[in-house]
Amino acid sequence: MSSNGQADAAVPSELNVMLDLYSDEEDRNAIRKAYHDLAHGDAKTFPVQFSVLLTAHAQALKAYQRPDLDIRKAQVDVSRLTAAVDSLTKRCESVSQTIAIVESLTRTRLRWAITIAFGVGVVTIPVLDVFVGWLCGLLHC
């Protein structure tokens, strides 16, 4: 039986979560008293829920200090980093291909491409003019 007159079997699980962190009976009694004073026996009150949340967080922080969990977290971080590097590598490959194309375009090649396009335009305009005239002649426009 606890100091506030309740049987230990009737102790709510929220209180047990907090009591599990402490081995000293004085600390456990202080937590029991604070729990019942703040909650008035109701585990759904804000102070109790908040303290349970803080306790769970404290336990998680203690568990985080375990080396096996650090190794697992590092493995997850490495796998995420590997995926990010792979994605970045793919992007860089396409950028490097674009850069290679631009570098291969010298001024001389660009001048030749523009000259050829202009020459094709100069030659095709009269040919198209003759073709349109011939088409109009056939259709009696």
Image: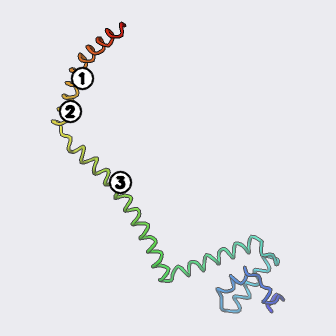
Nearer to the camera, 120 or 30: 120
- Indicate the quadrant containing the N terminus: top left, top right, bottom left or bottom right: bottom right
- Element type at mark 2: helix
Nearer to the camera, 7 or 74: 74
Q: Which residue is mark 1?
A: 121
Q: Amino acid at mark 2?
A: Ala
Q: Which residue is mark 3?
A: 91
Q: Position of residue 40 (x, y in %)?
A: 82, 77
Q: Amino acid at mark 3?
A: Arg
Above or below, comparing residue 69 to residue 79 in the picture:
below
- Indicate the quadrant containing the C terminus: top left, top right, bottom left or bottom right: top left
Q: Which mark's residue is nearer the viewer, 3 or 1?
A: 1
Q: Residue at x 82, y 78 (%)?
A: 41
In the visual, does 63 lie left or right of 133?
A: right
Nearer to the camera, 2 or 114: 114
Q: Which mark's residue is nearer the viewer, 2 or 1?
A: 1
Q: Which residue is mark 2?
A: 113
Q: Position of residue 125 (x, y in %)?
A: 25, 18
Nearer to the camera, 118 or 34: 118
The answer to which image quadrant residue 71 occupies is: bottom left
Q: Earlier in the sequence, mark 3 or mark 1?
A: 3
Q: Which mark's residue is nearer the viewer, 2 or 3?
A: 2
Q: Amino acid at mark 1?
A: Gly
Callout 3 crowding tier (Cα within 10 Å): few <14, some 14–19, many ≥20:
few
- Element type at mark 1: helix
Above or below, comparing residue 5 to residue 112 in the picture:
below
